[in-house]
Amino acid sequence: MECHRRVGAAAVVCLALGAGPARAATDVESLKALHEKVLRAHRAGDVEILFEDEGAGYVVANRGEVTRPTREERRSWLGPYLRSTTFEEYADVTEPVVKVSGDGTLGWVIAQVRVRGTQAAAGGEKRPLAFESAWIELYEKRDGRWYRVGNLSNFKP
């Protein structure tokens, strides 16, 4: 009986250790896919795609401030920006850096993108738009699903 317990316990430990790296690799791939979805939402000009994976308590750090905008506040400034912009390019400059915490509940993606396109001004005039930006997307896993819970971004001078 004691032998069976030891073998059973050893099997559980081996399975758990084996699942760790596999789980981590799956989580990294999930976060990469969510990052690509962010890029796709921009290219499509669809703010609602962004909100599909955003969790409650979203935090933004930008231009020297930390804020907690509501979804409606984010929609009010992201929506018009995305609808008035046509992107010819919205792509990673480098391979995103993706990390997941040891317990698999937190993750982050560091990305650098190049953007080119046109943006309609208030009178309808199209103006060129071009910039590079880097950001960190913060993720939290809740009930087995990843949610974007924050963003820290900046623009290349």
Image: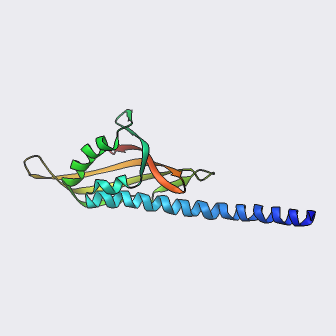
Looking at the picture, tell me which residue is in the foreground, 93 or 68. 68
Looking at the picture, tell me which residue is in the foreground, 111 or 93. 111
Residue 97: percent from the left, percent from the top?
49, 55
Residue 109: percent from the left, percent from the top?
47, 52
| Quadrant occupied by the C terminus | top left
Image side of residue 103 versus residue 145, left or right? right
Choose top left, top right, bottom left or bottom right for residue 17: bottom right
Q: Residue at x 33, y 61 (%)?
A: 40
Image side of residue 104 versus residue 40, left or right? right
Furthest residue in direction top, as rendered: 65
State whether residue 108 appears in this view.
yes
Q: Which residue is drawn at 42% across and 53% down?
A: 111
* Image position of 25 with respect to 64: above or below: below
State whether residue 157 appears in this view.
no
Image side of residue 118 versus residue 58, left or right? left
- Colouring rule applied to residues: rainbow
| Quadrant occupied by the N terminus | bottom right
Q: Which residue is drawn at 53% across and 52% down?
A: 141
Q: Which residue is drawn at 38% across and 60% down?
A: 37
Looking at the picture, tell me which residue is in the foreground, 56 or 150. 56
Image side of residue 17 versus residue 95, left or right? right
Residue 116: percent from the left, percent from the top?
25, 57
